[in-house]
Image: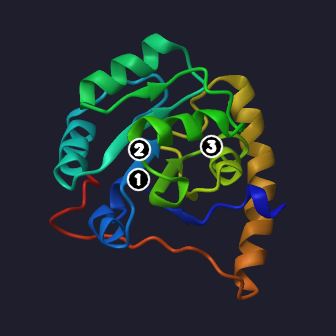
């Protein structure tokens, strides 16, 4: 079950201290799109655009890994100035994650993945050998029925994750920001 557990579980993508992670040696960030950065099927907003301008200023390579169709992922990537995308990625398989690393010329150990679903995003990142961060969905329960059904199973997994981490087991906590670099609105 540990393959399903995230390295850390935080409130939002936008409160992670990516500058501190860059100092730790991370050089690429892979993201899911829907409910990780914006609500399901929503376009890139000003906050997302400012956020990616900030990440690019830190010199991160940024790509999107999504099981969605190309028009959705391509449009979002172009709107925020990402370095590329993998659509219909076959998450939780590792191939899309590893292909993104190859395209960005980084190793999985230099890569952070951020997503909102355990059974696709986190499991896939863990399968690829990279650090994973689970974020709370931007707009939970306003999703396709199959995703809502997975959320119920994920709630059970999160219950066991909390027991696991409460027992003193290691969590790869990500640093969080407040104030000037906090993109939370």
Nearer to us of marks 1 and 3 is 3
Q: Are marks 2 and 3 in contact (CB under 8 Å)?
A: no
Residue located at (43% from left, 34% from top): 103
Residue at 30% x, 72% y: name it: 23
Q: What residue is drawn where x is 67% and y is 54%?
A: 126
Vertical comparison of 64 with 3: above or below:
above
Nearer to me, 108 or 31: 108
Query: Is 161 rendered above or below residue 85?
Result: below
Task: Bin the neighbour count of mark 2 within 10 Å (Cα to Cα): few under 14, some 14-19, many 20 and up.
Answer: few
Q: Is residue 43 visible?
A: no
User: How many tags in the picture?
Assistant: 3
Give the crowd class for mark 3: few <14, some 14-19, many >=20 residues within 10 Å. many
Question: Residue 92 appears at what percent x and percent y?
Answer: 71, 38
Quickly name the residue at label 3: 121
Q: Residue pushed farthest bottom?
A: 168
- Per the image, the residue denoted by label 2 is 105
Can you give x and y, in whole percent of width and height, for residue 158 in the image? 73, 61
| Nearer the camera: disc 2 or disc 3 | 2
In terms of secondary structure, where does tag 3 sit? helix
Label 2 to label 3: alpha-carbon separation = 21 Å
Quadrant assignment for the N terminus: bottom right
Residue that numbered label 1 is attached to: 13
Locate residue 100, reporting x and y percent.
49, 36
Distance (Cα) linking label 2 and label 1? 23 Å
The numbered mark, 2 or 3, whose residue comes first in the sequence reads: 2
Q: Position of residue 178 (x, y in %)?
A: 26, 70
Sequence-earlier tag: 1 or 3: 1
Q: Secondary structure at mark 1?
A: helix
Q: What's the distance in space between the residues labelled 1 and 3, CA to CA?
A: 14 Å
Can residue 18 be spotted in the picture?
Answer: yes
């Amino acid at each position: 079950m540990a393959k399903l557990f995230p390295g850390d579980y935080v409130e939002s993508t936008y409160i992670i201290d990516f500058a501190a992670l860059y100092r730790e040696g991370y050089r690429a960030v892979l993201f899911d799109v829907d409910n990780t950065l914006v609500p399901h099927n929503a376009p890139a907003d000003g906050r997302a655009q400012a956020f990616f301008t900030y990440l690019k200023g830190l010199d991160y390579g940024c790509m999107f890994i999504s099981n969605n169709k190309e028009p959705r992922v391509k449009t979002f990537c172009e709107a925020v100035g990402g370095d590329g995308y993998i659509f219909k990625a076959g998450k939780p398989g590792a191939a899309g994650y590893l292909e993104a690393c190859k395209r960005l010329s980084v190793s999985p150990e230099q890569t952070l993945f951020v997503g909102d679903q355990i059974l696709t995003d986190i499991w896939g990142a863990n399968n690829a050998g990279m650090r994973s961060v689970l974020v709370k969905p931007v707009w939970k329960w306003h999703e396709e029925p199959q995703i809502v059904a997975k959320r119920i199973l994920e709630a059970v997994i999160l219950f066991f994750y909390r027991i696991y981490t409460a027992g003193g087991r290691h969590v790869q906590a990500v640093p969080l920001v407040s104030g000037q670099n906090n993109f939370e609105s």
